[in-house]
Amino acid sequence: MRSLLLVLLIVAASVGWGQSSITTISGYAPAYIDQYVGVYRITDFLTQTTEKLGEALVKEDSTFSVSFYNEQVGKFKVMAGNNYFSVYAGPASNYDLFIKNRSPYVDYRPAGNEVEFFFLDLDSTDINFKIIDFEDRMLTFLKENYNRQAMSNPKFVKSLDEFKLKLERTYEKDTSSYFKTYVRYALAGLDNMSFVGARNKYEKYDFYIKGQQIYYENDRFMEYVMKYYEKYHTQVSETVNQEFYNGIISASPTKIMRALAKDYALEGFVLREFVMLKMLGDVYYSNEYPQTNILTILDSLSCQAITPEHEEMAKNLKRRLTQLVPGSKMPGFSIQLKGDVITHSNYYGKHLYIQFAQEGSLKSERDYELLAHLREKYGDAVEILTIVVAEDGAVKPTTYFREQGITWDAAVVNPSSAMLTAFDVVTFPHYVLVDTQGYIVSAPALSPRPNNEYDTVERNFFDIKKIIDRTNKEGN
């Protein structure tokens, strides 16, 4: 009986604890009816990697609601259709938003835009309220005190110190360590402005970085540290720089760590490894450092780094450095196609247009008819492959393809498929165009639907077919 009671107490406690960690983002998105709103946690500010936490379809009445497990305060990216914006969220919090279609201050991009939104109701103790209020205070201070004259006037230092003291008194009783860290490093960023009396490089290190733990989840802290160590290989001494280079030539993270230990601002072991990761990313595209060696080092760090955060960053950094760009090799993949296993190499010899669609998404499924039209006109020049993303068992491929009129190559994968990660698929539908040798032409590629400039992928198809027809004619 006691054992049963103990089990029931444990289950009840775990259920209650789980419920207390659920955060909900809901609201209105009239411009996105029948599209999805997804929430992503920014898990790595070095590479801006995100993790999908949940999504919901915007209903006919323009409402949506996304709930997700959340243990700590953090910054989240919200995707509405192809557009996006950022919010902060704490555990067991509920947020009501109104999402706008686009911002009048940002140039339109067919691939997606940062858009405006506003909170319908926000408690003064919420992290978003406090950050918005603080940012407004800081902007007001700069408007009133910082100008060309202030850059050469010692009085600005005095006014800045007074402003910091005033904020310190204002937030003295605040219990949020996340918010206090945010404020500290937002103010630290002010020290990077040009003015008489500003701290020098090593004073900034001593005051803001030395002895500090790394707040991986705080965007203001990470922003400050990454700016401080921006292109740091150009800031270290000639000796350290040469040893850093030798470490890369040897593909040895140990040798690089030893080299960087000779720099005053890299005495902390954990910080040093983080900066090493950043430096490897900074030099990857230069012609002076062998890329293969850098990728080997990242492979090593992804398996054995000082912290789990650095192992994940190493994986993400390698993925980012080798991500899809025009001229890069198409990622390998393997799919089930009509009972056969088909790989990427099966499509060599012909241009390939890949559609990543989402089952149940009207925006995805409305494109099938357009793809059928393109295939009829350009099927001899471009192969089309549709990858439908659906939960396991949600659709029967043969039935689904017949109902949707898909007569070209198509396969169904689940949302955790490695293919989605390899092709950087975040929103649906997503398109990729690949050449005859398996190299990326564009990712994301134009859609079969006209964008705001009335341009579609048919222009690419027309050019490809024109070249092929001319080549065939000359060959005859």
Image (cartoon, helix red, strand yellow):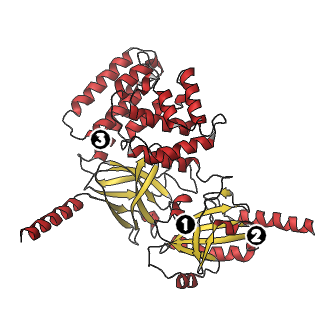
Quadrant for the C terminus in the image:
bottom right
Is residue 449 among what the camera can see?
no
In-front residue for pair 173/104: 173
Kindly identify which residue carries mark 2.
Answer: 381
Q: Which mark is residue 429?
A: 1
* 244 to the left or right of 166: right
* 320 to the left or right of 130: right
Mark 3 lies on a secondary structure that is helix
Residue 449, quarter of the rendered image: bottom right
Q: Position of residue 475 (x, y in %)?
A: 91, 66
Q: Nearer the viewer, mark 1 or mark 2?
A: 2
Quadrant for the N terminus in the image:
bottom left
Q: Position of residue 405 (x, y in %)?
A: 60, 82
Q: Which mark is residue 224?
A: none
Q: CA distance from mark 1 to mark 2?
A: 22 Å
Mark earlier in primary sequence (1, 2):
2
Q: Which mark is residue 178?
A: 3
Is residue 395 among what the camera can see?
yes
Mark 2 lies on a secondary structure that is loop
Mark earlier in primary sequence (3, 1):
3
Circle 2 packing at 10 Å, graded few (<14), some (14-19), many (20+), is many
Residue visible at 58% across and 35% down?
248
Give amino acid for label 1.
Pro
Residue visible at 39% across and 32% down?
269
Picture layout, residue 87 above or below residue 16: above
Mark earlier in primary sequence (3, 2):
3
* 165 to the left or right of 471: left
Q: CA distance from mark 3 to mark 2?
A: 55 Å
Picture layout, residue 380 above or below residue 279: below
In-front residue for pair 235/353: 235
